[in-house]
Structures are given as structure tokens and as C-alpha cells.
Image (cartoon, rainbow, N blue to C red):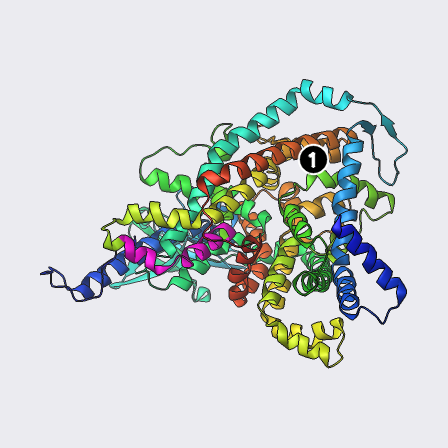
Amino acid sequence: MAAIIESISKWRARRAGRGRGKASGLSRRETRWGLLFISPWIIGLLAFYLLPMGASLFFSFTRFQLGAGSGTEGLQFIGFSNYIQLFRDPQVRKSLLITLRFMIIALPIGVLWPVLLAVMLNAKNLWIKQFLRTLYYLPFIVPVVSVAYIWRGFLNTQTGWLNRFLELLSIPGPEWLNSTSWIYPALVLVGLWGVGDALIRTLAGLQNVPNELYEAARVDGAGWFRTFWSISIPMVSPMIFYNTLLLVIGLFQYFTLAWILGGPNSNPDEATLFYNVYLYKQAFVYSNMGYGSTLAWVLFILALTVTIIMFGTQKYWVYYAAEEG
Amino acid sequence: MTNQSSPSHETRTPVLSGRMRFLLAASSVTLFAFMLLSAYLSPFAYMIVTAFKNRAQITDPKEPLLPLSATYTYTGEEVTYEYVFAEKEQEVTIQPGDEFDYYEVEKDGETRQWALVVPRRGTSFFINPENPDAGLIEWEGEWRTLQPAYRLNLQLDNFSRAWAEIDFLQKIRNTLIIAIVGDIGTLVSCTLVAYGFSRFRIPGKNILLIILTGTIILPGQVTLIPTYALFSRIGWVGTFLPLIVPHFFANAYNVFLLRQYFMSIPKDVDEAAMLDGAGPLRTLISVILPQAVPVLIAVVLFHFVFAWNDYFAPLVYLASVPDLQPISIAIQYYNQTYTFEPNMIQATAIMGLVLPVTIFFLGQRAFMHGVVAPSVGK
């Protein structure tokens, strides 16, 4: 109530004369400048996030074929038909299962690998740290198209180096990208190259751990693993949380590597028909923009649910050291 | 790994001195990190080696890993040599383009690398590739017992061939336009927005910042189709515009990166400037930006590499216009439809990554510090 009275009196003061109430005039001007400066983002938020989100929710209840150059003429409201179709569509079930199964093997490795690398690269008695960190980060900035083709060659059953190496150890190399079961471990291997930003984030977290904590642990006689588990991990858990969140959402949207390595037919035998690949095909190969929007919204709801669950669990395992808002 | 070998002088009776133990631990950790790195980056080695091979070098299953070959291609003029074998006069004609195998040949106590032209039982005839005009060299012995002589044979043609067949210059031009114009948009818009968020009182600022963070984790698919429909309606599909214009409206990563840097610049300097009568825009340009050059460079590099590497947006918006495609799409299209030769594919992989990797090595500090900011910003 008091706030309303105050704002009314401010408004009166404003109307009464611009000269009076200098302080509030100044802050008003400041606010106006501030809004002006952030306006590009506000406009972008409306034009490229909020309105399209609303529009795609609307499209998800329509049949909507978008031919080249045509507008929204072919748009037809069909209620929940797309959602009913989605639940009956065997390809949806298949692609969702592929995505979730891949997530189960890719997630633990994708979370652990950058942490282990970061701990190694933060080791006290490591020489030429900067050099090693740079090179471990390097694959992250290689274009995904190059990454896909490098690994396709490297994992080739006959001429690829991995199988030639396994041959030296007398281990018969699997068919990797041509096998419906080995393709997933193969994609996980390729994914090991995509952890550069997670690595640097975790490394930054480790570097911020106060040295006293390690000193105290040493005085208490804690070994390497104990120190790692009880000090390093909790101290970088905010980074691990953030990395995990980005990874989960990224895996829901897994597309480019599957598209390049599997091709439009999702070889081998539709094993690379990830959910997002199916979405892309519906929208941009078959031009089913309405059904595509339905698939997109279901993806969004799934990702949002996982995000909310993850934020809910973070109080059990994420340690924020005396953080102020 | 953090095996603490303390450098302090303790009074245990050590088998190794403290310094020795430190050196041992350091060298073993470093060695381990190196070995892991070699395995981690070995696909790059595969790429480089394969890109310089020719077709024969790849298909031969016994072929060594390096782009070596034991084949000599004759480049001189057509010539006919006479020789005597089994007491009969015979002749052999060699033409430019003929291929012969290299062998390690021992003669007069020296081992030479010669190309085998006339293989016969008991006596064979070679030419010396270093001096092919000198004619045939007779050598007595069984050529089948000779070791093939592999020598480095780099196939630079792969690159020039891919360059021409992809029309790489045009694709580089396209990529540069998309990356540089987008870079200008990103830099200007993110600077303004970050300045607004770091220096001004804005109602609901915390909520806006949370929404800004949210855009990082929002799956792009949920906005993709309407955005595409809109761009299609206004005739932008098949042009650079959908890949450039959205970058003029700021993005969360770079706004957080810049905002964090701006907030670390003491406020009293720009307050002093304002008291001198400088407006907010003037303060930004003449006080803040000169102090923020490193982070501005980071933003420019980030966006450039992002745009160079981007695959999805050009796939969606430029799929039907080969003349406007950036190199990511062009390389993929080329490898999917024109060539199935591993050497060509690896050559294109190299051509795709040379520029981003070079930029990364030149500006590595900016990169490695830049990634950290957005996560701290939440």
C-alpha cells in the first residue's frame, strides 16, 4: 500500500515540475538510459524467443505445410491431432528411445571426463601446464564438420587407426560406425572431443579452491582420493552441475554428428535417428511444420522437466561456498 | 596425482631426497598427461597423414602409416633402352607416367634406391630416379629378395583438387561475410546490453538476468520453426540475413562475459566523466571501452569461430543455394556426394579447421578465460 502511495506522489511530483525532485529525476533518467541500452536484447527476446515460442505452440495445433516462398496459407487448425499422432508414431518412440539410451551412456562419461582432465591438469607438480591445457582444449574449437570426418576416418573398420591399433594387440576391432550397437560407443568417443568448455570451467573452479583446505586435509592425513572426493569435488560441484545441465540439454538436441555420420537415412539401420534428427526431417525434409512444432514443444517440455528436477536436486549435492546474490 | 611431496625439509630419513621425489612425481604426472594427450589427439595425426596420401597408399592394407610410397613415376621423355638378357638383345620403352617400384639395391658395397624397370630371373635392370637419363643399370641377383624402398611421397594435389572442386574461395568469402558482419552485430549489441546491465538501475533487473540465463539452456528447436516461417515469408530464406540479423540483438554468453568485465572496472572513473558532462554513451565509448579491449577481442574471436564452425543454421537456411553456402555445409556436401576417398575427405577436414585453429593459437588466452565467465554469471 505504501508503495502505491509513494509511486502516486512521485508521479505527482513529476507532473508538478521537472525541476523539482532532482534525485528521482536523475534515477528516472538513469533507468531510461538503462532500458535503452538493453533494448536490443529486449527486442531480440521478443522477436526471436518469446513470440516464436508462442507461435510454435500455436503451430503445434495445426497442419501447416510450408512450401518455398509461400506464406501461412496452408495453415489449418486441427486441435490435438498432432499430439495424438505423436503418441502413436512408432518413429517418435524409436527416436526418443535412441536419444535416452544414448544419454545413459554419454552422460556419465561426459560429466566425468572433463573433471578427471581438470584434476590432472591442475596437479601441483605438473610441468608445462599452460601448454597441456591449450592442447586438451584444442578439439573444442575444431568445426563439427571436420570433427565428424576426422573420426569417421579414424574409426573406419579396415583403414582406421583405432582398429589398426587394436589389431596390434590382437583384439578384433568392431565395426564402429557401421554397427547398430557399436555406433553409440563410437559417438561417445567422438563426444570426448567436445568437453573443452566444461574442462576450462572445472579447471577455473579448482583453481579457486583455497589452499588452506588442502593444507588442512594434509594435516589430517587425508590421502589423494580422500582429498579429491571431499574437497575438490564439492568445491567444483557448481561447475559440475552447470556442465551436467548443459550436457543433458545438449543431448536432448543431439543432431549434427548424427546427421553427418548417419546421413539422411540415419545409417546404420536408423540407429542414428535421434529425436532431433526426426524433428528436423519432419519439419525441413517433409515440410510438416505443424507436426514439427509439436515435436519441438514435447522436446522443450522434456528438457524443461529435467532442468526443474535438476535444480530441485542441487541442494543435495551442489555446494555453494558462501555465495551472495 | 596431487601426490604432495612437500619441499619442506622434514627429518624422515628419505630414500630419495625431497627434491628428487618432487622431480620424480612431476615427471611421471607430466609423462602420463603427455601419453593421454597423444591418444586424445591421435585422430588429428590420422587426419594429417591421410590427407597427404594418394589413393594407392590408402587402399594397400600393408601400407605404412605415413604417406610413404615405393612407387616411382617416370617423368622424362619417352625413350627406348636396349639390354641383353639370356644372351639375347632385347629392348624396353618407357614413357612419362610409367610407374616402377623402388627397391633397396646393394651394389659395389653401397645401398641405393633404384626403380626396377626390367625384372628378370638372375639379372634385373634398374634406373636411377635421381638421374634417369643415365640409362639402365644392370644388377645381378634375385629382385624378389630386395626390400621395397619407401620414401616420403606427399600428395599436395589433394588440397588443390578439393579447393577447385568445392570452389573453396567462394565458400570462404561467404563464410567471412557471415562471420564478420555477424561479429559487428554481436559486438555492438552485446556491449550496449552489458553496459546497461552493469551500470544502470533497471526495474526487474534480476528477473531479466534470470531470463537471459534461461536463453542459454532453451532448446533452439522450440523457436526454430516459427522463425523459419517468418524468414521464409519475408523472403530471407536462401540469403545471409537469417544467419546475420539475429546477432544484432545480443546473446547471453557474450553479455555475461562483457558485463562481468565491465563490473570489474571501478565506477568512480565513469562517474567522474559523467560529472564532467559526458553522457552515458560518451562514457561508454571514451571511458569503459578503452579499458575493456581484451574482453572485446575475446567476444570478436568467439563469435568469429562460432560463425565459422556453425553447421545447423546454414543447413536450415542455405540448403538450396550452393553459391551462398559457408564452408561447413560445402565440405559436408562435397564429402557426401562427390568423393568417397579418405585422403580427399581428410584434406577437406584440414581445410575446414585451419583458420579457427590458427585464431585459437593466436588468441588462446582470450579463449580460455572467456569460457569461464557465463557460468560465474549465473
Above or below, A132 relative to B236: below
Determine if residue B242 is in view.
no
Circle 1: residue type: Tyr
A37 vs B165, nearest the viewer: A37
Q: Left of A170 or right of it: where is B96?
A: right
The percent coordinates of residue B228 (x first, y second) are 78, 42
The percent coordinates of residue A264 (x first, y second) are 65, 34
Segment colored magenta = A197-217
SS majority, magenta: helix
- In the rendered image, which residue does mark 1 sit on? A280
B326 vs B291, nearest the viewer: B291
B1 vs B271, nearest the viewer: B271
Which quadrant is home to the C terminus of chain A? bottom right
Q: Is residue A209 magenta?
A: yes
Query: Which residue is located at x 75 percent, y 71 percent?
Result: B281
Q: How many marks?
A: 1
The percent coordinates of residue A1 (x first, y second) are 76, 47
Q: Left of B231 or right of it: where is B164?
A: left
Q: Secondary structure at mark 1?
A: helix
Determine if residue B174 is in view.
yes
The percent coordinates of residue B13 (x first, y second) are 9, 61
Query: Which residue is located at x 53 percent, y 67 percent?
Result: B362
Chain of the residue under the numbered disc 1 shown in the image: A
Quarter holding residue A35: bottom right
Residue farthest left in this picture: B13
Above or below, A162 relative to B198: above
Query: Which residue is located at x 54 percent, y 66 percent?
Result: B363
Residue farthest top in this picture: A88
Q: Residues within 10 Å of mark 1 (few under 14, many from 20)?
A: many
Quarter holding residue B267: bottom right
Q: Is residue B145 magenta?
A: no
Above or below, B272 relative to B237: below
